[in-house]
Image: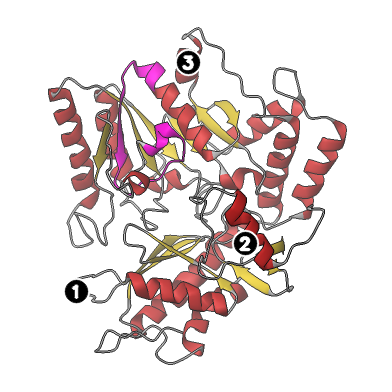
Amino acid sequence: MASEVFSKQKTIYLRKKHIGPSCKVFFSHDPIKIVRAKGQYMYNEKNEQYLDCINNVAHVGHSHPEVVSAGAKQMELLNTNSRFLHDNLVQYAQRLQATLPEKLSVCYFVNSGSEANDLALRLAWQYTGHKDIITLDNAYHGHVSSLINISPYKFHQLAQPEHSQHVHVAPSPDIYRGKYREDHPDPATAYADDVKDIIEKAHAKGCKIAAFIAESLQSCGGQVIPPVGYFQKVAQYVPIAGGIFIADEVQVGFGRVGTHFWAFQLQGEDFIPDIVTMGKPIGNGHPMSCVVTTREVAESFMSSGMDYFNTFGGNPVSCAIGLAVLDVIEKEDLQGNALRVGGYLTELLKKLKERHPLIGDIRGRGLFVGVELVKDWIKRTPATAEAQDVIYRLKDQRILLSADGPHRNVLKFKPPMCFSTADADLAEILEENGHEFLSNDTNDNHVLL
């Protein structure tokens, strides 16, 4: 804990003085100073309570006592690197693997989602001997250099984007705003065929595909749910090209989708990626992450002759915390809760959509839900300014929500998994604060909240 409690203004002043200016804060016009949190609630310096609808890092709830206790007890006993034998490491790897298809059996523990995805690329490059990567438009995979190159969500923001010649961008499989929409007879095949075309064009130029990487559900890209069958079809084309399939579960894993423990499983039992990366919820806020792959890929990585060592990855404290997170998910039936509460929230939002033309689409699985705001249902013109108004005015009601997507017009619900139906009733708050909450008027002067 900090030795001195600063006023909010002093905290802002010192942040501007000492923290890099590109490190942004939520609600930059009037940032919130959070001093504690518990469950799905966060508290500012005035002890005012905020409902957290966006924190998918505090997966089983902020400051969960079992997770805190597990970490503290292990920290009192031992923390060291994974070059020493320790049961926590192998016990956690065993527990984690049990949630995955059998062939995904080898774990590499690291410290962040970015580190996991960077390592996944190294595994792919070594295993295939190829260099080129296919990524999805609007994708975000992390902040290190290798991942900025494969994250259009990031590199599109650059004033003069520099695209790596080894990176190929496929259309996002978005059936609401994308190239092939909900009225297409087979959007899964159509989007997959675009990947096939990219492969053929790359081969024509002498390029070779190392991997196709995709978030199992695109989050920063706008809460996009790929059509069922899309991954299977892509997974037919990529191996023929000599590449492998990487599923990024950093934002959406660990039961968030409700029906399954991993979001890639929404595509069906016949789809199994070659590598799965995970982070954020894995440690409930503790910095840990993991790459899980097949024995074949792991042995190829070893054959490079270079040992892989990570000072903090898989340390006893991290693994104790990871085990506690898995225990809580199971004991509190948080996957089931995500299914029940997520379904309840989605239905409330769909009813709201029927009454308000600003809501163009409701989509999601479990406690991963997107609300796309548009100015026109037919043209689907993004309502970007309106979305920003919504999140700021909800903040005034002490409800924390964010907007994302390529047009920043998609409201994102990714709360802690202990989110309740009472919390989900926030959807009705949208109307309680004024009859015109989500309505457009003829002069384009929206009245929100």
Question: Does residue 38 appear in the picture of this structure?
Answer: no
Q: Residues within 10 Å of mark 1 (few under 14, many from 20)?
A: few
**Residue for point 24% across, 89% down:** 442
Is residue 248 found inside the magenta-colored segment of the image? Answer: no
**Residue for point 67% across, 50% down:** 330
Q: Position of residue 145 (x, y in %)?
A: 42, 33
* CA separation in Å, label 3 and label 2: 46 Å
Is residue 142 found inside the magenta-colored segment of the image? Answer: yes
Identify whether 309 is placed above or below 392.
Answer: above
- Residue range in magenta is 125-148
Q: Which residue is mark 1?
A: 378
**Residue for point 17% across, 58% down:** 184
Identify whether 233 is placed above or below 200.
Answer: below
**Picture disc at residue 301:** 3
What amino acid does circle 2 point to?
Answer: Ile
Q: In the figure, residue 364 lies in which quadrant?
A: bottom left
Mark 3 or 2: in front is: 2
What amino acid does circle 1 point to?
Answer: Ile
Q: Position of residue 153 (x, y in %)?
A: 35, 48
| Callout 2 secondary element | helix
Q: Which residue is mark 2?
A: 12
